[in-house]
Image (spheres, grey):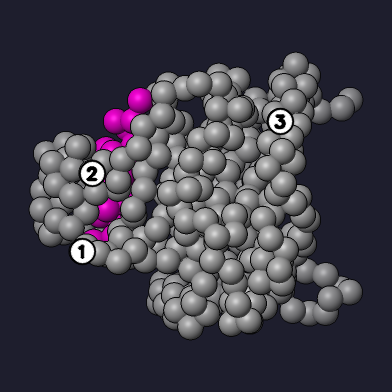
């Protein structure tokens, strides 16, 4: 007997309509749809993510990785002169399973040549309105959001952040770094204060959380990075992209060293991406959107499961 689908047929029809709207949105703006490989000889270095590994007899004994995002391959296309591009694809992340997480899910990612993060935020808002209608939209910087929630901004001393969290009843484990305390504050207090029926754009992340974004001049220095939340659920993560191959290699190597120090798997660097950056990645901004979450928000569903044809479950569930 066939397995019962996670989503209803009515939801799958609505999801197909949303995919069609996404493609129409980019076709109207002359953004090229592309496809890139899901399998790579390089893995992700990001400390917040883990790749799912794969083996292939035809590719030899070397371990391969299912991509957590099409970003690296798409940047190679940008460096080759593709111009504005987007992709709808399946991506894979280990240790992600729950109401709003699946190890395999659909991502929309796109890049605009010559744009910065502020311009891209406008377009993300345009796309979301085309999908979910005219919801209330707010914008706030990372430090402002933190200050509104706990009374101090991101530049506060670590001890001060811990003390403010303790006032809110948040237990902070001993020995956390400043960034880890910021992450805890953001996850437990800041995001919980976002309006559940609105889209919240958080921009200008701390420089230490730049990931693949460039840094903005000024004091304090902040990253040209933004995230979008539907209530408490993250929908999108965008950057004014870093184009400096030397700085990108330094960040990758720092992340790999941190992985090694805690006994986590250390994958090979993506040398093809670094070569593309060295060749010349054009000035651009890019963003990744979790499509299953977007569908769930648009249709008022209580998790990604009811938005997907089938879901993965833990053993014995």
Tell me which segment is drawn in magenta: 177-195
Point out the tag, 3 or 1, that comes first from the N-terminus: 3
Q: Residue at x 44, y 36 (%)?
A: 229
Q: Position of residue 188 (x, y in %)?
A: 30, 40
In the picture, the disc for residue 219 is 1
Quick check: 46 left or right of 312? left
Quarter of the image for the N terminus: give it: top right
Q: Position of residue 207 (x, y in %)?
A: 32, 64
Label 2 and label 3: CA atoms lie apart by 34 Å
Q: Residue at x 74, y 25 (%)?
A: 17
Residue where numbered disc 3 is placed: 21
Q: Nearer the viewer, residue 167 or 208?
A: 208
Residue contact between numbered discs 3 and 1, judged by CB atoms under 8 Å: no
Q: Nearer the viewer, residue 67 or 174?
A: 67
Residue 135 visible, this angle:
yes
Quick check: 126 left or right of 72? left
Label 1 and label 2: CA atoms lie apart by 15 Å
Q: Quadrant of residue 85?
A: bottom right
In the picture, the disc for residue 125 is none
Label 3 and label 1: CA atoms lie apart by 41 Å
Q: Position of residue 221 (x, y in %)?
A: 27, 64
Secondary structure found at label 2: helix
Q: Nearer the viewer, residue 129 or 46?
A: 129
Point out the tag, 2 or 3, that comes first from the N-terminus: 3
Q: Residue at x 37, y 66 (%)?
A: 215
Q: Residue at x 45, y 63 (%)?
A: 213
Q: Position of residue 176 (x, y in %)?
A: 25, 61
In the picture, the disc for residue 144 is 2
Quarter of the image for the C terminus: give it: top right
């Amino acid at each position: 007997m066939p397995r019962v689908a996670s989503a209803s047929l009515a939801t799958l029809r609505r999801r197909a309509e949303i995919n069609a709207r996404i493609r129409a949105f980019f076709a109207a703006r002359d953004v090229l749809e592309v496809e890139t490989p899901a399998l790579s000889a390089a893995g992700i270095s990001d400390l917040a993510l883990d790749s799912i590994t794969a083996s292939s007899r035809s590719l030899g004994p070397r371990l391969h990785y299912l991509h957590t995002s099409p970003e690296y391959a798409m940047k190679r296309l940008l460096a080759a002169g593709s111009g504005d591009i987007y992709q709808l694809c399946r991506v894979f992340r280990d240790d992600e399973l729950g109401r709003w997480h699946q190890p395999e899910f659909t991502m929309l990612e796109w890049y605009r040549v010559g744009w910065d993060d502020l311009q891209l935020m406008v377009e993300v808002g345009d796309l979301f309105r085309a999908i979910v209608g005219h919801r209330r939209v707010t914008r706030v910087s990372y430090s402002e959001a933190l200050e509104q929630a706990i009374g101090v901004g991101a530049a506060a001393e670590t001890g001060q952040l811990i003390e403010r969290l303790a006032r809110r009843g948040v237990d902070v484990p001993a020995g956390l770094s400043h960034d880890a305390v910021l992450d805890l504050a953001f996850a437990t207090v800041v995001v919980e204060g976002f309006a559940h029926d609105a889209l919240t754009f958080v921009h200008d992340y701390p420089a230490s959380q730049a990931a693949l974004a460039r840094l903005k001049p000024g004091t304090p220095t902040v990253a040209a990075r933004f995230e979008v939340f539907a209530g408490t659920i993250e929908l999108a993560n965008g950057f004014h992209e870093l184009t400096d191959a030397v700085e990108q290699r330094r960040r990758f190597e720092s992340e790999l060293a941190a992985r090694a120090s805690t006994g986590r798997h250390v994958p090979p660097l993506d040398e093809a991406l670094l070569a593309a950056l060295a060749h010349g990645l054009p000035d651009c901004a890019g963003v990744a959107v979790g499509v299953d979450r977007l569908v769930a928000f648009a249709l008022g569903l209580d998790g990604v499961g009811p938005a997907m044809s089938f879901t993965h479950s833990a053993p014995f569930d």
